[in-house]
Amino acid sequence: QLQLVESGGGLVQPGGSLRLSCAVRGGLISDFYGIGWFRQAPGKEREGLSCIEISSSNTYYEDSLKGRFTISTDSAKNTVYLQMNSLQPDDTATYYCAAASHPNFYLGPEEYDYWGQGTQVTVAS
């Protein structure tokens, strides 16, 4: 059974960094056209942060991230990462990874077919 399993969340002080992991189990990263990272804060809609096209390794980011986040893959570990730097309280949310099994994907949650359970990121002093 295919599963996406996120890890790496936690409590971090403002200005700190975290690296989130999304492990694909029961399948391969290469089975998908793309993997994306999303977040959802309480009372807000789920928003797309970044995605990577698996075949080309092309990466895409939401404009407001201003270079703070970096998406990457490790095929040997069947894992996708999201490096997050200069974190601020507004980054507090549950972070999700998702996989797209078709080529028409970008940063819209509705464009993805498989989702992980999420990992909590809290930025506070």
Image (cartoon, rainbow, N blue to C red):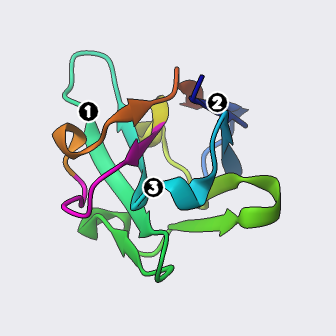
Residue 111 falls within the magenta-colored stretch: no
Task: Please state which of residues 120 and 14 is positioned toward the viewer in this rendering.
Answer: 120
Tell me the SS state at disc 3. Answer: loop
Q: CA distance from mark 1 to mark 2?
A: 18 Å
Q: Would residue 71 appear left or right of 110 to someone viewing this image?
A: right
Residue 1 visible? The answer is yes
Q: Amino acid at mark 2?
A: Val
Query: Residue 98 in magenta?
Result: yes
Q: Residue at x 48, y 34 (%)?
A: 95
Q: Earlier in the sequence, mark 1 or mark 2?
A: 2
Closer to the observer: label 1 or label 2?
A: 2
Looking at the rendered structure, the secondary structure element under dot 1 is loop
> Residue 73: x and y, percent?
65, 65
Q: Is residue 116 above or below residue 78?
A: above
Sequence-wise, which precedes: disc 3 or disc 2?
2
Residue at 63%, 33% (x, y): give it.
6
In the rendered structure, find residue 32 and report the number of the disc placed on it.
3
x%, y% of residue 98?
43, 41
Give the residue type at disc 1: Arg
Task: Quote the CA–CA distance across marks 3 and 1.
Answer: 21 Å
For the magenta stretch, what is the residue range? 97-107
Judging by the rendered image, the residue that carries numbered circle 1 is: 46
**What is the chief secondary structure element of the magenta stretch?**
loop
Gap between marks 3 and 2 measured at Cα? 15 Å
Q: Residues within 10 Å of mark 3 (few under 14, many from 20)?
A: some
Above or below 28: residue 25: above
Count of numbered badges drawn on the protein: 3
